[in-house]
Image (tube, rainbow, N blue to C red):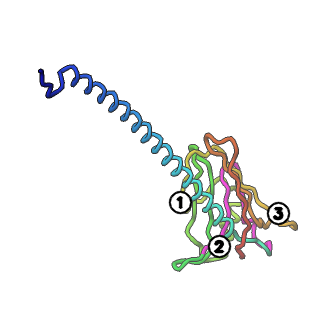
Amino acid sequence: MKNNQGFTLIETMVALLILGILGLMASQGLGGAFRVKDSVEGKIKDQEAVVVMLKHLQNDCEAMVKNADEKLPPTFIQGNTYTWLMRHYSSVQANGWQFVGYVIEDNSLKRYITPAFSNKQEAAGILAALSTDPDLGLSSAQLSYQLPQVIRQKIEPYWSSYTKRSAIGLQISLSLVGNRNPLTSSCIAEGKL
């Protein structure tokens, strides 16, 4: 009687071949899972960037100065490229008026802000200069945030029913690359002069 105590060479090779095929299938599945994970994380990061920009727009709108006495040019100014608004800014370090500009450059929506101007007359002078040509911009404005993949932005004011000198809110619309429908948001200004 013959005693079989092991595997033949052919049995071992077949077993290794089957394990190799299973390992290859598992690695392909894991590679696909990691690609999906990376894709989902990228989309989440893109959505978070959109949320941050919409929060900036919302905060800027809520702090936008209402020109209730109409002694200033409109505090919402739109040119061919830039959209500017004057907002009231208050923090522990500074208190005053600040200008915020939005522009699309290189398929990115960019937000520019100026330092806070504590002098009301100085802020009024800057506002008057911006009113004559908003597309010249402000040299003191610094880039504070940018949202990539934006192909179009539309910011429209809700004017006071009495005049077009006091914007009481904004309608915001952003068209992103790859999205058919624009993202829209509305807000009401609370700032006072």
Q: Which is closer to the viewer, label 1 or label 3?
A: 1
Three-letter amino acid code at the position of disc 3: Lys
Q: On the image, numbered disc 1 is attached to which residue?
A: 144
Span colored in magenta: 69-89
> In the image, what residue occupies the spot 18% across and 21% down?
9
Taking the spot 39% from the left edge, 33% from the top edge, the residue there is 28
Q: Residue 15: give its label.
A: none
N-terminal-most mark, 1 or 3: 1
Above or below 121: residue 175: above
Q: Which is nearer the eye, 119 or 150?
A: 150
Q: As drawn, is 18 to the left or to the right of 164?
A: left
Q: Which residue is mark 3?
A: 164
Pinpoint residue 82: horizontal percent, then vertical percent: 66, 53
Disc 2 packing (10 Å; few <14; some 14–19; many ≥20): many
* N-term mark: 2 or 3: 2
Q: Amino acid at mark 2?
A: His
Q: Amino acid at mark 1?
A: Ser
Image coordinates for residue 40, horizontal then vertical, percent: 50, 46
Q: Dot 1, how many residues are within 10 Å of its Cα: few (below 14), some (14-19), or many (20+)?
A: few
Tell me if 154 is positioned left or right of 93 in this view.
right
User: What distance separates the C-alpha of mark 1 from that of mark 2?
Assistant: 17 Å
Residue underneath mark 2: 88
Point out the residue furthest to the bottom here.
92
Q: Quadrant of the C terminus?
A: bottom right
Closer to the chain start, of discs 1 and 2, is: 2
Residue drawn at 63 percent across, 72 percent down: 97
- Observer-nearest of 15 and 165: 15
Q: Position of residue 110 (x, y in %)?
A: 58, 53
